[in-house]
Amino acid sequence: MTKGKGKNGESRVIGPFRGRYRWLSNFFEAPTSYDGTVYPTTEHAYQASKTELPHQRKLILACNTPGQAKRSGRLVTTRSGWMKMRVDVMHEIVTDKFERNPELAVQLIRTGQRELVEYNRWHDNYWGHCTCNDCIEEMHFNHLGEVLMQVRGELWQRCADGSLMLAYLIKPGDILAHPEHGQVTLQGYSDNMIVDCRVEMSNGEVTYFKMADLIFVRGADNG
């Protein structure tokens, strides 16, 4: 996979999920719930979801690190039909991660339409894309990256239809992302719960949008 450049010079691909993008990793510390229990990371929640035995879930919850949780998850009694449901379960868990941690939801939306790829060197071509020489000819499914992009699209839609509000993060002068018009600059807004926004488009036109039409994102991610 080629890490090309977009029209603004930024990479069209984000990955691997470390450094400034570590928050995309399941190992990032962000409270995440599954089946009524809040886990310290998405990795904890995912590993616990593999089993239906309460005592095994408690053991994973007690793990001090996501790496320890991952190792413990290899020892659990796997629930029936797990292999067929695991991507759907990951989607559920990743969705909760970003709903529960709105500052991360904002960062995810700010990635725009860039491809998210879990590049790795540990031969995981199911959830990611291993870049080692031994895996060059392997199929790279990148299911975690695909799930993240699906959740990103769903967050965009929920912001657009008004069911998810991230408006508390914006102020006049911020650059916003609009699903039809791309990046726009917020010139001002009413004090009445930001019902109407006056937006100056990149082509110089001035347009008014209602709050539900905007994805409320502070700044632009050019990295």
Image (cartoon, grey):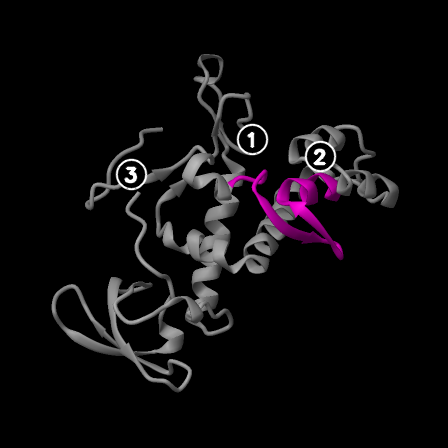
Q: Which mark is residue 11?
A: 3
Q: Residues within 10 Å of mark 3 (few under 14, many from 20)?
A: some
Residue at the location (75% across, 42% down)? Answer: 48
Task: Determine whether 206 is above or below 133 in the image.
Answer: below
Q: Of the residues under marks 1 and 2, which one precedes in the sequence?
A: 2
Structural distance between the alpha carbons of marks 1 and 2: 19 Å
Which one is in front in this view, the residue at disc 1 or the one at disc 2?
A: 2
Residue 38, horizontal then vertical, whole percent: 71, 53
Q: Which residue is mark 2?
A: 69
Residue 89, horizontal then vertical, whole percent: 66, 47
Residue 181, horizontal then vertical, whole percent: 25, 64
Structural distance between the alpha carbons of marks 3 and 2: 33 Å
Q: Secondary structure at mark 1?
A: loop
71 sits left or right of 30 in the view:
right
State if disc 1 and disc 3 touch (CB < 8 Å): no
**For the residue marked with disc 3, what is the amino acid?**
Ser
Q: Of the residues under marks 3 and 1, which one precedes in the sequence?
A: 3
Q: Which mark is residue 17?
A: none
Q: Which residue is mark 1?
A: 126
State if disc 2 and disc 3 touch (CB < 8 Å): no
